[in-house]
Amino acid sequence: MFGLTKKVESKDINEAYQEFLDNPDIILLNADEYRDFETLHIVDSQNLPLRVINSDAKSLLDQDAIYYVYAILEGTAFEACRRLARLGFTAYNLGSQQYFKGPEEGLKKKNRKRRK
């Protein structure tokens, strides 16, 4: 297993989102299950659940892209990022979506006004 471990680098999710907006080579990747992604996700992000990030992911993803990975749970984002790095992708862990302060979309947007 020597050489297979690669340190997972982290970035602040809000600063990383600005970098994503400025750089077309960055892909914002959500590692949650499809139903969770549909419920709420960062605008313009893509979804690839952690359970399918394996050797088959090489055929699904662009090897030249930079992946900024987030999820509902920090551990999910970390593990997804670790797996991508092991497969040879450039990936950064953004941690949990709960700290994101930018635009989100889905069936359940946060910060919605409640009916009275």
Image (tube, rainbow, N blue to C red):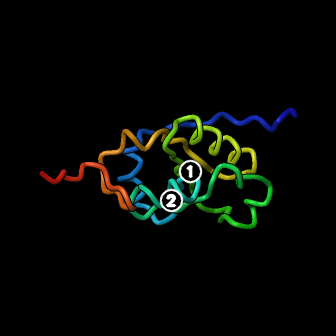
Upstream in sequence: badge 1 or badge 2 = 2
Q: Residue furthest front?
A: 116
Amino acid under label 2? Ile
Residue 26 percent coordinates (x, y): 50, 59
Residue at 41% x, 47% y: name it: 16
In the rendered structure, the answer to whether residue 14 lies left or right of residue 10 reads left
Q: Which residue is mark 1?
A: 32
Horizontal side, residue 111 vs residue 4: left or right? left
Report the disc number at residue 26.
2
Dot 2: what SS? strand
Residue at x 43%, y 44% (from the top left corner):
97
Q: Is 62 above or below relative to 102? A: below
Local crowd at mark 2 within 10 Å, few (<14), some, or many (≥20)? some
Of all residues, the one furthest to the left in this rendering is 116
Query: In the figure, residue 106 lies in which quadrant?
Result: bottom left
Q: Give the x, y percent position of residue 17.
A: 39, 52
Residue 52: percent from left, percent from top: 71, 55
Label tally: 2
- Find residue 29 and report its horizontal and vertical position in percent: 54, 55
Quarter of the N terminus within the rendering: top right
Q: Amino acid at mark 1?
A: Asp
Q: Secondary structure at mark 1?
A: loop
Using the image, tell me which numbered label, if any, was put on residue 84: none
Q: Residues within 10 Å of mark 1 (few under 14, many from 20)?
A: many
Nearer to us of marks 1 and 2 is: 1
Above or below residue 58? Residue 96 is: above
Using the image as rendered, state which of residue 114 and residue 20 is in the foreground. 114
Residue drawn at 52 percent across, 62 percent down: 46
* Mark-to-mark CA distance, 1 and 2: 19 Å
Vertical arrangement, residue 25 with respect to residue 116, above or below: below
